[in-house]
Amino acid sequence: MLPDTVHKLPREERFAYARLLAFMARVDNELTVDEMAMFEQRLGTALLSPSQRKVIRSALKTPPSLEECLEGMGEETGRLALRDATLMAAADGEVDDDEKEVLQQIIEHFGMAPDSMERLLKWTAQGYVWMQKGYDILNDISE
Amino acid sequence: MYLDLTVDFAQEDVTGYAELMVIVASADGTLVKEELAIIEALMGRCMMHPEMRVNIRNMLESPPSMDLVVAKLNPVVLKIALRDAMLVAAVDGEYDDSEIKVIKALAKAAGVRKKELSALFEWVKSGWEWHNESFQHLGLL
């Protein structure tokens, strides 16, 4: 929700980004409300057209393979998708082994540093702390 | 863990909340792509129905009156709307005077005092810094 660059990617790259997130959402075979809310948020950020969103939502039911998602995907798109896939995987409170395996495959596909996943998971946890702080301020107001 | 309170808002509250985002985004008379993207993200986060999103997009050209929108919302919705309106206002890199005016009016309506409003401004700043760190981790800087 903060200043991002996803919306600046070319249209087809934004679509590829969203497709990868759709794949990620189904990795552990369950789609929680938390993950869905994060998924919808990221679709919004990508400024996809309503028809593209429809296609992406249907990809949730029959997700493409990871190889299909990554094929031809640009470097910047892949890295941003990796970050947001991490946020989505952590949205329900834990990142399971299947999800970590996919994140690692994306990291290797784009030749990123070996500690990338660790760093992104740490960054994600810091982000959730930040979001909670926003609530804490609002709660203080109510007291 | 991630779920935001906006997911549980009643339909009329979600509409009012999104209308306030439109009001703050259009306050300075120009609507940049970053503002559009964050409004779409916020509508997505509260899982607003696609048809309701169309109605909100149509308001971007002529936003509703803030007084009318505020009058129909309860304090909880107003507080969450204030928090997110500040994110919308900040997204293009700076707070415009007209955006600050809307934020202050919204804070007043929500019963938020100056001290807490300052804390929220700091919170936005720290979130901005946190988000920018992601580009370092991704090697995109």
Image: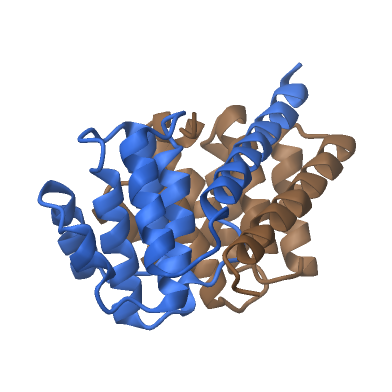
In the figure, is residue B39 to the left or right of A136?
left
Q: Is residue B55 above or below residue B1?
A: below
Q: Nearer the viewer, residue A140 or A18?
A: A18
Q: Position of residue B74 (x, y in %)?
A: 56, 29
Q: Colour of chain B?
A: brown
In the figure, is residue B61 to the left or right of B96?
left
In the figure, is residue A49 to the left or right of B105?
left
Q: In terms of image quadrants, where is residue B40?
A: bottom left
Residue ID at (56%, 67%): A4
Q: Nearer the viewer, residue B26 or A37?
A: A37
Residue ID at (15%, 59%): A64
User: Outermost residue toward the front?
Assistant: A114
Q: In terms of image quadrants, where is residue B132?
A: bottom right
Q: Colour of chain A?
A: blue
Q: In terms of image quadrants, where is residue B9?
A: top left
Q: Position of residue B16 (x, y in %)?
A: 47, 45
Is residue A41 at least partly visible in the picture? no
User: Outermost residue toward the left?
Assistant: A62
Q: How many numbered discs?
A: 0
User: Outermost residue toward the right?
Assistant: B115
The colour scheme is by chain
Q: Position of residue B125 (x, y in %)?
A: 77, 54
Residue ID at (38%, 31%): B10
Is residue A18 at least partly visible in the picture? yes
Which quadrant of the rendered structure holds the C terminus of chain B?
A: bottom right
User: Outermost residue toward the bottom?
Assistant: A10
